Structure formats: C-alpha cells, structure tokens
Amino acid sequence: MATRPIADGLFVDDGDAPRLVAGRCAACGGLHFPRGTTCPYCAADGCTEARVGPAARLWLYTAVTTRPPGYRGPVPYGFGVVELDGGLRVVTRLTEADPARLRPGLAMRLVVEPLFTDDDGAAVLSYAFRPEDT
Amino acid sequence: MRPVYVAGVGLHPFGRFPDRTLTALGAHAVRAALAEAGVGRHGFGAAFCGTVYGGVAAGHKVLTALGLAGVPIVNVEAGCASGGAALALGAAAVASGAHDVVLVFGMEKMPRGIIRSSFFEPWREEAGLAATPAYFALRAQRLMRESDVTLDDLAAVSEENHRHGVDNPYAMYRRALSRAEILASPVVCEPLRLLMLCAPNEGAAAVVLSARPAGGRAVRVAAAALRSHQAGSVLGEHTPMSGRADDGVPAPTETAARDAWAHAGLGPEDVDVVELQDTDSAREILSAEELGLCPKHGGGRWVRDGGGATGARPAVNPSGGLLSKGEPLGASALAQVVECTWQLRGEAGARQVPHARVALAHTVGRGANACVVVLTT
C-alpha cells in the first residue's frame, strides 16, 4: 500500500527511531515545532533544523470523544502535550485514548503510524506519542 | 483625548434562528441601538462591525439593508474578541476627534458543535490537532494540577452562571442546572463535561459611541484595550503546535487588563460588575485570575468562597455568561458591553447588581486576542 506523510516537514522516519523536525534558533537557542525559518520567541531569522525525540515525558492529556471537524482518524483518541529534551512542549495525538491509563510525567515514545486512508487509497502517516511501557 | 460615552445599545437574543439571515440579526441590533441613541441616517460618522464567519463585507450588508451605508464601514475579525476589537477602534475614533458619533456592532451565525476554523491548516484538522474543546480540557487539567481547583469547582461555575441566565431573556439556556446534573453530563474531553462548555450559536449586539454624554444616566467608556499573545505558551489561544516553559509569559488577558486599568486610572478592587469569558468553566476561573479578581492559583478558593456569585463584589457574569447565552463570536463581546451598560444604568431588571458604578467586559480567544473594556457611570 502506498503511504504519504500527513504533511511535509513534520517528522522523519528513516528506519531508525522516528524524530520530529523542530527548528533551533541560532540567536536564542529556543526550539520550536514545526520548523520555521524565523524564531517565534526572539524574531531572529536563520533557524536551523533540529531533530528531536523519540523520548518524551507526558505533561497534559485528555481524550477527544466527539469527532472534530475535518478529522479523519478513529474516535475516541488521546490528545495532549509532551515535553521533549530542551524543554520543547509539543501538541500531539496520543495512542492511548483512556485518560485513566495515563499520568503526568509518564515516559512516552514517538511513533509514526497510519492514521487514515486517503481518497487515493494511500495510508496517511501521522505522528503520535505512546506510553514507553506498551 | 476626549471622553467617550455609550449613547445607545441594542441586542438580538442569542440562540438559533434558522429563518433569519445574518444581516437580519445585525440589523435588529443596530436599529435598536440607533433608536435608543436617537441617531438617524446621517448621525454617525463611521461604523465598525465585528464578525468571524460573516463573510465578505458583512457589516456593509447590514447597513445597506437599513439604508445607512455611505459612511466608512470597517469589518473587524479578532476571533472571540472581534466585537471588542471593533469597540476599541470605534472608541479611539471618537476619543481622537475623528468622529463625534460612531456605530459599533457585531453578529454571527455559527453552526452547532465543535467550531470549525479556517485558522487551522487542513492537515491539522485531519490529524485531530484542531479540536478546540481538547485545548480547553488541557488548560483545565493544568489549572487543576497546579492549583486546588477541583471538578466540583468547575461544576459550581457552570451552576452559578446558569442560575444567573434564568433571569436573562436574551440567553439561549434559561434553566437552572444542578451541580449533580452538570457532573453527570457526558464527558466531552476529560475533565470537561458537556454542561461545562458554552455552545456556539447566533446573535447580534450594537453600541453607539458618542463624544457627548447621554442625559442623566451617562455611561463612559473608560478604557477599551486589545492585546495579542506573546510567544511561549503551548496552551495559548493562538493554539501553536509547540511552546516551552511559560511561567514568565503574561497571558494576553493580563496585558490587556493592565493596559485597561492604567488607561482608566482604576484597578480590579474598583469594579462592581464583570462580564468575563467563560467559554468553559475552567476559562472563567482562569479569566478571574488573569483579570486580577483573585490571586493566581487562587481561583478554586475564589469559587468556593462564592466569588462572582449573586451578591458578591464584583458580581461576575450576571447575564449568565456564555455558558447560558451561547457564543456568537462577533456579537459576544459587545453583548457583554450591553449588559454592563444596563447594569451601570440600573436597567438590568432581575439581574441588577446594586449600586454598580464600574463594570468590566472581557473576551479572549483565537488569534490570540484579548479585549478588556472598562465602563463607568
């Protein structure tokens, strides 16, 4: 089956552990995701690519129980914010849709996996974080 | 700068009106505000219209329908604060002397359910990363983790606002809800239950601003401050994909409130009545903290001590808030200003807060945008 990423430039998954493609500011050192050329914190140009993950800690989490407009994956699904090295906090889908099975500080791992099949029959890959111990 | 007064207000009830167009909703509110102000066809120098989903030249369509076009008409989109942004522009136009009288209005027709926003790129919707109530839920979870706010406190906020809404003929929901009923409603995004969230709906509001006081019950616009976010918070209303430790980053409501108090020469201790953003129960507590109505991380205690309840000072959301009224984006901020005006004039009927002399209206939402309006007698 053909596959494609849900958007270009979000993640790399080249057989080794997947990584998110963040930007690092040459002036202030701040990390942001997805990568842009201008730093959102200090407005300096010339941010460089920084691949981050796959390890993270769970910060905040919930589950989405009603299909939001435009969403093409399964419901319910987990949704939260994880913290990566360097203090970068990233909004992400979570593979665990039951908040009772999650807790703050839980060790998480980045996964790149098919979320839905598009109108051309291609499996669309997106990123999510799953609890390390599953 | 000249003082700015509220010369007239008008409101179309908030609810769902499948047989009325957006233009008709806006025209209803505009007609009422102009009539109250005694302002006719050539009586205002400019118009500012807040709307998010109204489409091209929505404000022009309203004034065309009323035969009032010809003046400059500016359509303003600033998310949930659109009406507040329109008011800030209108107030500045009067204060500066550019116009003696301006018309400010806002209206919206929202579909039911989770708000769909062109703010998000399509892939973010497809990936499930554009679910607005989920962001509300993460803010609520953080509030509960970093302070002593409980699920019961969240239910208490909704219970109180719905109690107020019973007395508001302009609200969509006018039934008192018990805390047990709120807690038993379906979980939308843990910890938020359905009855802790406001409903997008339809409505319109209008305000006529003037450089001249309106008779013996003059209400003055002491400040109308609009701010956007500063980068850093992953939970900010600009809904970024990432952020970092944000404890030192002021929220846009904090910066807008600071500007507004400084401009008005007043502070949170002076305010008698507040209409604040309560898109969900946790947002009301965050708004109260960010506006300085209670200490940061003191919102749980504030709720349990009856903060904002009937008889408290300040009274908060005597209109019933967005939880009772629903939220038509372009109209909601101006409807708060209308309620505050009625409160300061002593015209709020069963909702009247006794001896109200200083009122504050607050909205925050997508953009991020935050607007704080201070009105005085």
Image (cartoon, rainbow, N blue to C red):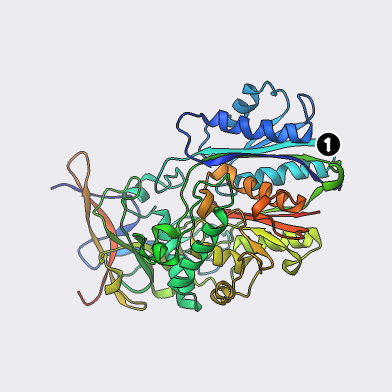
Give the residue displayed 66% in from the left and 63% down from the top: B315
Residue farthest along the left direction in this orientation: A1
Whether residue B50 is visible, yes or no, is no
Give the residue displayed 65% in from the left and 53% down from the top: B350
> In which quadrant of the rendered view does residue B247 lie?
bottom right
Looking at the image, residue A116 sits to the left or right of residue B352; the answer is left
x%, y% of residue B20?
Answer: 50, 29
- In the rendered image, the quadrant that contains the C terminus of chain A is bottom left
In which chain is the residue bearing label 1? B
Whether residue B317 is visible, yes or no, is yes
Q: From this view, report whether residue B286 is shown above or below residue B130.
A: below
> In which quadrant of the rendered view does residue B57 lie?
top right
x%, y% of residue A61?
Answer: 36, 68
> In which quadrant of the rendered view does residue B257 lie?
bottom right
Q: Which residue is mark 1?
A: B100
x%, y% of residue B282?
Answer: 50, 65
Q: From this view, report whether residue A109 is shown above or below residue B331.
A: below
Looking at the image, residue B153 sits to the left or right of residue B254; the answer is left
Q: Residues within 10 Å of mark 1 (few under 14, many from 20)?
A: some
Residue farthest along the front direction in this orientation: B350
Give the residue displayed 45% in from the left and 76% down from the top: B145
Which of the two residues, B241 or A64, is positioned nearer the viewer here? A64
Which of the two residues, B372 or B38, is positioned nearer the viewer here? B38
Describe the element under mark 1 as helix, strand or loop.
Answer: loop
Looking at the image, residue B223 sits to the left or right of residue B236; the answer is right
Q: Which residue type does callout 1 highlight?
A: Asp
x%, y% of residue A125?
Answer: 24, 53
Q: How many numbered tags mark residues here?
A: 1
Which of the two residues, B226 or B113, is positioned nearer the viewer here? B113
Residue farthest along the top direction in this orientation: B67
Q: From this view, report whether residue B321 is shown above or below residue B117.
A: below
